[in-house]
Image (tube, coloured by chain):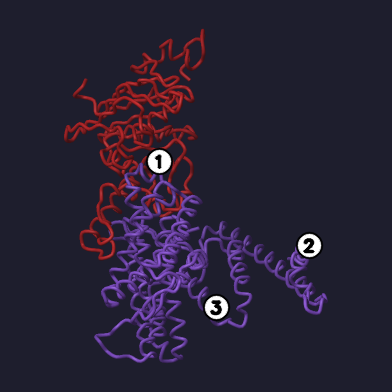
Amino acid sequence: MMNKSILEVSGLTMDFGGIRALDRLDLDVGPKEIVALIGPNGAGKTTFFNCLTGIYLPSAGDIRLVSPQTGKQSRLNGLKPNKITKKGVARTFQNIRLFSQMTVLENVMIGRHCRTSSLILGAILRTRRTRKEEQETIDKSYDILEKVGLSEQANEFASNLSYGAQRRLEIARALATEPFLLLLDEPAAGMNPQETADLVTLILQIRDEGHAILLIEHDMKLVMSLSDRIFVMDYGKKIAQGAPAEIRVNRAVIKAYLGEDEGPDNA
Amino acid sequence: MITVKEVKRSLLVSLWFVFLTFPLMVIKVNPYERTVSWRWRNMVYVAIGTFVITLLAKAWFARKEKRMARQQDSCHLRLPIIQRILQKPGYRNSLAVFLLGAALAFPHLFSTYQANIMTTALMYIVLGLGLNIVVGVAGLLDLGYVAFYAVGAYSYALLNLHFDLGFWTVLPIGGLLAALFGVLLGFPVLRLRGDYLAIVTLGFGEIIRLILENWNAFSKGPSGISNIPRPGFFGLEMSLDQAMIYMYYLMIGLLLVTIFVVNRLQDSRLGRAWLALREDEIACQAMGIDKTRTKLIAFSLGAFWAGLIGVIFAAKTTFVNPASFTFMESAIILSIVVLGGMGSIVGVILGALILVLLPEYLRALSEYRMLAFGAILVAMMIFKPEGLIANVRRSYCYHGKKSNTALKNDE
């Protein structure tokens, strides 16, 4: 297990003043695995993501990342968000945070930022290297847009996209940073059944290309059909983990979602 | 087209304006003769003027709404005429060549005095373009921009006074010193945004001015530093007129360099990062952009241009004192950026020309300058909040072929 997982979280704790949002949380993700993180509202799932991506500094615990390409291990605690992204962890946001006054293509091009390097002089002199890098950025971004099915709208403003398309654009933008671990925060929120079905296909396709995926989701149908493993949180604590079939009948999970003495329900 | 309701509303508005301006426009107290004169005629003017302007504004808005509705029907984005010209490379180039020719011929067609005013306008264009990097592109509201201008001006004045350094040596030094101050200001304000950032930068501007005013041993205080030499041209002796014309051409050259550099910066990896930073800082960081570095680069690059212009200002007036670097200067430069259109180079140029040249040529109305200034900005916010010429987002080519030639209009 130690060698296999690409993300290992142990004893992660996050305190906001007197409130403990995350309480000694353990979690791991293997390569090419789809792991879901579920739990009732306010359980601390998004806080967990924010700790993972460096937006919050955890109070205690360890976040370790093992690059599947190089096998190099690194500790993420206390790193800035952009450093973590550079190490290969990208995320989407629960409340869509696109650059709405930029075009769809430009949004994805921003994702390429950490894999490119030209700066002031390169921009002013527009050397051959810079021009090559720019064209590569454009081409790669366009390829990613084609993958998520947004290449038609490449030069639209991001704010003009439909809700489902905006969610897909967020995924495209995250993919542009070349992550090996993709964190999706409620990717299906607000989507209609057709869009959700397309999303499932897309997520599976991304997994097959070699990315591991950790997702927060409330749509149980999607979670149960996609995930290899599920972690369940409540009040900042992990209350269960296991394969979808196990979680479905887990008493603690049912209690957290529905209260005491209720029959099993997969919704 | 104009309904009774609208006429009623306009009447109410004009009544309200009459009430507001009554003490100012109608009552005139003469303290020597102890009389009060009532200028009723002014009241009539105000009433009629406001009434007509309100009606016109209403008609304008109605037309705009109609046009918007039509555009949504046809799905066709109609750009304003200036942008349609700028879009076509042929038109754009011939316009640029014409403008450059006009600019080069200007001092020979008009008097040196006119050239001198134009030089000032050119300086403000460059200042506007520099601030545009910080405010327009990176979205960092900087109210203390004049501080960097002061750093540039004083670095020339002091380096010349103490070490006898020439204009051309100090020009890059002044720019770099200002850029350094940009970084110095940048560090403490990295966490701040919006209003808070504005307040701190405002304070920074005042601190620099107050230091210059009070540290007599360093800057000679309010009396300033005089006898700063004008820029040399391979040791050639020049008369005052020639020096002024030389200054004008120097500014034209610097402006061209500035436009070239700013244009390339905006349209690069760095420029995109700035735009993203303006839109959403958290998402920006999560996408792997180093917020600290990107912000500091914006601050220092913006400051660099202010430093250059500072050196030129000192050389042009041959005298500097702290009174030239008040908050008013910052406000004018910021107004240039806002009036012209945030992030738009052509907009900033137009904004600077309007805000610098109009007060010069309308000297007869100089008493009302501030009034007009305020009125222009208020009108802008109502009618064209995106600026005279809004920025246009470019579309990119994929594998060398045009993917979509339609440009989008940035709000």
Identify by letter the chain in red: A
Q: Which amino acid does label 3 sit on?
A: Leu
Query: Badge 1 local density, few (<14 within 10 Å), some, or many (20+)?
Result: many
Between disc 2 and disc 1, the foreground one is 2
Above or below B407: residue B232: below
Q: Determine the image quadrant of residue B263.
A: bottom left
Q: Can you give x and y, in whole percent of width and height, for residue B207 in the image?
A: 44, 59
Q: Mark 3 lies on which chain?
A: B
Above or below A202: residue B265: below
Q: Where does label 3 land, which residue?
A: B358
- The local secondary structure at tag 1 comes to helix
Q: Can you give x and y, in whole percent of width and height, for residue B47 in the image?
A: 77, 70
- The local secondary structure at tag 2 comes to helix
Q: Where does label 1 land, which residue?
A: A168
**Residue at mark 2 to residue at mark 3: CA–CA distance:** 32 Å
Query: Badge 3 local density, few (<14 within 10 Å), some, or many (20+)?
Result: few
Do callouts 2 and 3 mark residues in contact (Cβ within 8 Å)? no
Q: Which of A264 and A130 is in front in this view?
A: A130
Q: Which numbered disc flags the more N-terminal residue, 2 or 3?
A: 2
Between disc 2 and disc 3, the foreground one is 3
Q: Can you give x and y, in whole percent of width and height, for residue B139 in the image?
A: 44, 55
Q: Mark 2 lies on which chain?
A: B
Name the residue located 58 percent from the left edge and 61 percent from the top edge: B381
Q: Where does label 2 land, which residue?
A: B12
**How many numbered discs?**
3
Q: Can you give x and y, in whole percent of width and height, for residue B103 in the image?
A: 41, 83
Q: Answer whether residue A211 is visible to the viewer in this image.
A: yes
Q: Determine the image quadrant of residue A79.
A: top left
Q: Answer whether residue B403 is visible to the viewer in this image.
A: no
Identify by letter the chain in purple: B
